Amino acid sequence: MDSLESALLSSVLALMLGTATALIIGLSDVRMKGAYTFLLLIPMMIPPHVTAIAWIQALGPSSALLQSIGLAPDVGSTHPLYSREGIVLLLGIQHAPLVFLVVLAALRSLPREMSDAALVSGARPARLLRTIILPLLAPTLIAGYALAFVSALGNFGIPALLGIPVRYTTLPVLIWQRLASFGPSVLTDMAVIASLVAVIAVFAVIVQLWLSSRRRNALIGLPQPPLDISLGRARPWVEAGLMSIILATLVLPLSALFATALVPTYGVPLTLETATFENFAEILFRQSVTLRAFWNSTLVAGGAAAIIAMLAIFVARYAAARNRHMRRIGGAMTALAEMTYAIPGLVISVAFILAFINPLPLLGISVYNTLAIIFLAYLCAFFSIALKPVNAAFLQLDPALDEAARVAGAKFFRRMMTITVPLVAPAAASGAILVFLTAYNEVTVSALLWSSGNETIGTTIFNYEDGGYTTLASAMAAVTVVATVFLMAALDRLSRHAPPGVVPWRI
Amino acid sequence: MRSGAVDSGQGPVTPMTRIFKGDEGLTLVVLSLLIFVLFIVPLSLLAVVALGDGPGPIWEALDSRSVPRALWTRWKALCFLPCSP
């Protein structure tokens, strides 16, 4: 019940926040739309457990940031985020960018005839929004809600860090607690809860896909430039509103995170005298666990990103094949990957525990309790992320090139290496970076699969925070945030050489 | 030009044999096996274990009980009882 409650309520918040920002960016004449879009999407790319840690430190009595400006709550007072409302708030903020992306994409493809007619007839922007745009967007809004709901349902980091202290237990947290409880029925218990989460998630995704297909049917005519309604004198105020959202959802929690990473002990106010880089030195040079975690995550996420990008090229190639049977098989693989992406990471990890708990048949090698099982689970969980941009690239590829090479006698692998791969490489590279970004500091998949010596960045941050080493957790989270923003910027530059739709925020 | 022209002289080609012919077909087989092991096996096992009395063959898992009833009984036992005050 806690799962459904938090997912349903937080999706409402995500829908309101994501739709409002998408309408402002997509329909008005605000300046620096690209920069706003990039900044609004950063919370989506930061892993949920890091978001939770940042917010805990932003608003708690021991907040280094609030203490330094004298606004910290009294010591001993209850942390406002350790509650149902806190979980709903953070899940809403975390998933608002998903709704933002879906609504922005829909606004880009809305038919303009009715809007233009209404504007010519003298309709005010508010009336245009109420009578034309929102009704046309209705299926998209429901689809966006379903997407936010599925993401909130499978979220582990936020309910684990905020919900466990107040016994607000969602299904992913219950799975995690069941694994820790041992006992003869632990696997069956986990499998039952995981199946339940998977069934709800898949159902929500089917609803979302059905509504998305209805939206596409509503399109008429050629794509046209989006509306650019002049805000007039209100523009500075609207821009200030957007900036406030960015300050509240991104700058405040991240400032608190960096402030905590810079103090010697949690609870000490950040001043010039107390500021220290000791926590960073500790995690980057001294602690063997963190060094191992950075190495493991880089290795597993990097390996998974490379292999997934390569596999995605082949699957997308078959999904776009001229041979009907090959196209069907490729299409089935794509559908399977899409469906699996909807299944929460913790459910995937339970499935992989069940599949690989025994040594591999014939080979007698066990991958359980090794990095290999995390690597395999990443391949399954994040395959769809790289497949989407590669599929988009294949749609723009002229099949005549491949046909010509085939007629000239070039074999399959030669055609792939000399024609197909060079043409879809930018999209595949973007997909690989997206996979790396997601896998590098995730905790949902590896929370059940890590073991001593096989820690990942996500599990180490989570364990530090859970064990009370807050400053070290903050320092490690701060490093991953910097790495995430750096990779997003690199991806943004790379996407200029790739077709539209390859990078989520370049619609 | 259709691929049949390139394949001429190699005997009759049916749609199914055409899929699994040559490097392209072999790659598709390998890819299908990989997808089967990575996606279908783990998720099927999850469903089997969830519906059965523990990790075991599917025919043991899907015994006389109806699937929705089995799921409901387990879910109720796991989720409702521990959460109630």
Image (cartoon, rainbow, N blue to C red):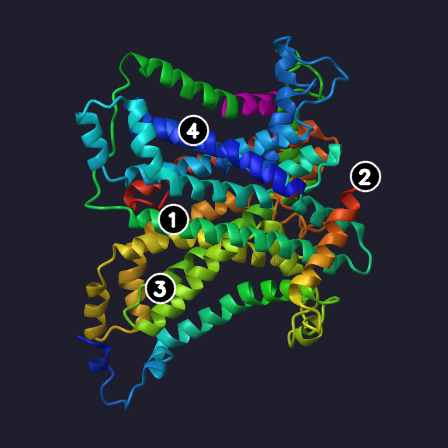
Dot 3: chain letter: A
Dot 4: chain letter: A
Amino acid on which disc 1 is placed: Ser
The residue that appears at 41% across and 52% down in the rendered structure is A210
Mark 3 or 1, nearer chain start: 1
Residues marked 4 and 2 touching at CB (< 8 Å): no
Q: Which mark is residue A212?
A: 1
Q: Which residue is mark 2?
A: B85
| Foreground label between 4 and 2 | 2
Q: Dividing the image into 4 quarters, which one contains the N terminus of chain A?
A: top right
Q: CA distance from mark 2 to mark 3?
A: 52 Å
Horizontal side, residue A196 vs residue A486: left or right: right
| Foreground label between 3 and 1 | 1
The residue that appears at 64% across and 8% down in the rendered structure is A70
Horizontal side, residue A311 vs residue A111: left or right: right
Q: Which residue is mark 4?
A: A39
Q: CA distance from mark 2 to mark 1?
A: 41 Å
Whole-percent x, y for residue A274 in the image: 66, 14
